Amino acid sequence: MILARRTGMYMILIALATLFISPFGWLVITALKDTSELAAYPLHWTPHEWQWSNFSRALTQIPYLAYARNSLTIAVIYSVLVTLSSAWAGFGFARLRARGKGFLFGVLLSTMMMPAMITLIPTYIIFAKIGMVDTYWPWVLWGLSGAPYLIFLFRQFFANMPRELEEAAIVDGCGYGRIFWRIFLPQSWPVLATSVVLSFTWTWGDYIAPSLLLSADHTTLAVAVATEYVVPSTGAPINNLLAAGAVMYIIPVLLLFLVLQKGFVTGASTSGLK
C-alpha cells in the first residue's frame, strides 16, 4: 500500500514537472530549427538538422552582449539596493516601537493591491521633469525605496527572532543600527537569498519600464529580444533566432536560482527561526 502510494505520488510529480518544463523544451527545439522547418506542415516535432549556429547568429544579429550588460547592470543595482532597504524597513516594523506602526504597515501592504499600470504615466512625467529619462537613476531610486512584498518578508522573519539577542546587544552598548548590521542581517540569509532572486528576476524580465524610460541604444535585453529579431525589409520576426535569444536570456536567472536555491526555498517556506 505504501509502495503504491509512493509510486502514484512520483508519477504525479513527474507529470507536473513535464508540464512545467515543456514550454522551455519547445523553446529550445524552436531555437534549433531552420527557418523553413518553422513553417512546415505537418509540424516537425524535432529538427531534421540541428541548427546550433542559430545561437551564434542570435548573438550577432543584434548587439546582444551590450543589451545584456545593460540588463545586468540595472538588475544588480536594483536587487542589491532593494534588498538592503527592504531589510532595514522590515527590521524597523518588526523590532522598533512607535505609535501607529501597525497602521503604517497595513498601508504598506495595501499598496501591493495597486496595479502597476496606473502609475506608468505619472512615473514617466516625474522622471522626465527631473531629467532622469534614459539613465539608471530610476532603478536606483526604486531600489532605495524598498518593495512592499520584500519588506513584509523581512518583517515576518525579524519578528520571530529571539528578543534576547536584541536585549543582550543593547546591554553591551549597541544601537539599533549595529544590531541590524551585526546581528539581524547576517542571520537572515534565507530571506536575503529570496529577496535577491525575486528582485533580480523582476528587473531582468521587466519590459515596460525599460521601454518607457530608456532609449533604443541603452535599452535592456528583454526589450531587444522581444522587438529586434526581425527581417529589416519586411519587419517579420525571425522566430528561430528569437527563440535562441530567449533561451540565452533565461540562462542568467536559472544560474542565479541554482546558486541561491537552498536559501530561496528556506526563505519562501518559513518566516522565522526553527
Image: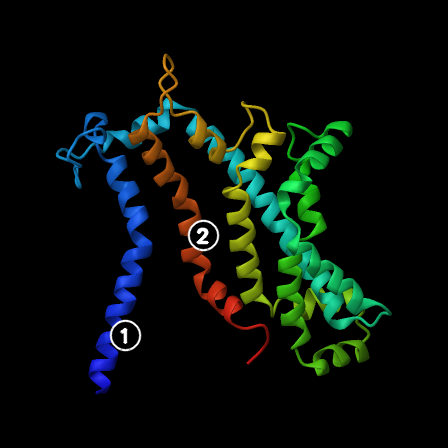
From the viewer's perspective, is 212 left or right of 109?
left
The answer to whether residue 14 shows anywhere in this view is yes
Amino acid bearing label 1: Met
Give the residue drawn at x 87%, y 70%.
99
Q: Quadrant of the N terminus?
A: bottom left
Q: Residue furthest bottom?
A: 1
The colouring scheme, among rainbow, by chain, secondary structure or one colour, is rainbow
The residue tagged 1 is 9
- Left-right relation of 137 to 6: right
User: Relative to the observer, which residue lies in front, 168 or 204?
Assistant: 204
Residue 63 in picture, x, y percent from top left: 43, 25
Compared to residue 122, the image places residue 76 above or below, namely below
Secondary structure at badge 2 equals helix
Residue 50, image quadrant: top left
- Mark 1: which secondary structure? helix
Q: Which quadrant of the view contains residue 196?
A: bottom right
| Of marks 1 and 2, the one in the foreground | 1
- Position of 235 with respect to 44 (left or right) is right
Residue 84 in view: no
Type of amino acid at the residue the image marks with label 2:
Leu
Please state which of residues 229 and 83 is positioned toward the viewer in this rendering: 229
| Residue 253 spot, x, y in % from top left | 44, 48
Mark 1 vs mark 2: which is more N-terminal? 1
Badge 2 is on which residue? 256
Q: Is residue 112 above or below residue 216?
A: below
In which quadrant is the C terminus drawn?
bottom right
